[in-house]
Image (spheres, helix red, strand yellow):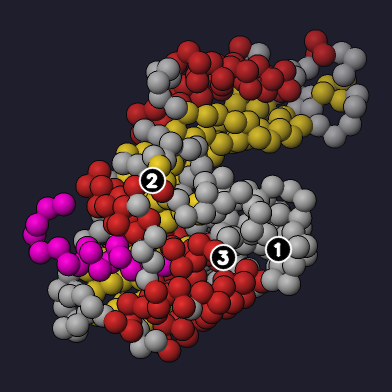
Amino acid sequence: MKLVEPIVARHAELTEIRRDIHAHPELAFEESRTGDLVAGLLQQWGIEVHRGLARTGVVGVIHGRHGPGGRMVGLRADMDALPMSEHNQFAHASRHPGRMHACGHDGHTTMLLGAAQFLAAHRDFDGSVVLIFQPAEEFGGGAQVMLQEGLLEQFPVEAVFGMHNMPGIAAGSFALSPGPVLASNSEFKLRIQGKGGHAAMPHLAIDPIAVATQLIQAFQTIISRNKAPLEAAVISVTTLHAGDTFNVIPDHCELGGTVRAYTRETLDLIETRMGELAEGTAKAYGARCEFHFNRIYPSTVNHAAETVFAREVLQELVGPEQLIAQAPIMAAEDFSFMLEKIPGCYAFIGNGDGTHRLPGHGEGPCLVHNASYDFNDAVLPLGASYLVRLAERWLARPAGVGL
């Protein structure tokens, strides 16, 4: 590996920063302490700091050897935690019950800080590097809010690059591919209105639970019989609420869940068919149904040229044997909003198999969104080095020259 040596030399400092952020997790749009920490370090390193986008977002701008002006490239990290309790008991475990950095955003933020410190100290490039510390990735669509509030108008970057850790991929390896790498995320809710009655006299009632059970099965026929077989998509009913006691047929039932897909055409099909099935099934049973479908995040689609560019940077950094193709997964990510507006690439850095965790970790697997997860500090210099080389190499390209 050809890591940036000054970053490697600060490994212990980066680890301390990461564990401090981990111990003080903050939820979407509440990342005040994290934002203060990030802004304070950037200012300490002589970096121009902008605050206020999406409430708690922080943007740093590092100008190259010739000062302001010229081309810009963006590097993005997310800062928020999840509303869940941590099972780990080591010294840097969350100090706030019900909040945990269970997805590695503490590591993402720290890797971008490591890159920022080096770039600010050397500035061996023309143009500017825009450091985007984004709030509310998990809930709230912080990337979309930053865009709506003028991120690209204030900082017109040519391209943007992001990264996420991936448990199960060996530390020291990266995965990236062009095209869809993460799915869209949509939520649906249904309220089925029937007619309540005595459980011993169902013929005098209209049972909304019977309608719900038919719909839960019928929705899966969209996946198996309406959607093209080679198009990936998932419909999951995850909530079902009805009734208060054992001998009463309730008058209504509510259910909800999530839909994941890669293409807008497939998502359009699923939404249409779900609405038709909900209305038709309810009508067949003499009930009524209210159906609501909310598109949260679009799918994350890597641009081909920028992915090739990122792969070339990584080949020089870690070697081609450490690069693997990222098979698309059905999780979602609001970096997708940025990739809809400007070219870029979202890569995955290996987080290992969990053996890096300190004594006192929970008994569960080291998977994201798991109460026993912890980011692998061993990869901090690697991720920071990747971001540095991305920015330097992007700005070294002659203006107007294609990838």
Q: Which residues are magenta?
A: 384-403
Q: Residue at x 44, y 63 (%)?
A: 382
Q: Residue at x 39, y 39 (%)?
A: 325
Q: Position of residue 369 (x, y in %)?
A: 63, 50
Is most of the magenta stretch helix, strand or loop? helix
Identify residue for label 2. Answer: 321
Identify residue for label 1. Answer: 358
Q: Secondary structure beneath disc 2?
A: helix
Instruction: State the separation of the CA atoms marked 1 and 3.
Output: 11 Å
Q: Is residue 199 left or right of residue 293?
A: right
Q: Are marks 1 and 3 in contact (CB under 8 Å)?
A: no
Identify residue for label 3. Answer: 377
Q: Secondary structure beneath disc 3?
A: helix
Q: Amino acid at mark 3?
A: Asp
Q: Is residue 66 left or right of residue 326?
A: left
Instruction: State the separation of the CA atoms marked 3 and 2.
Output: 22 Å
Q: Nearer the viewer, mark 3 or mark 2?
A: 2
Q: Residues within 10 Å of mark 2 (few under 14, many from 20)?
A: few
Which label sits on residue 163? none
Q: Amino acid at mark 1?
A: Leu
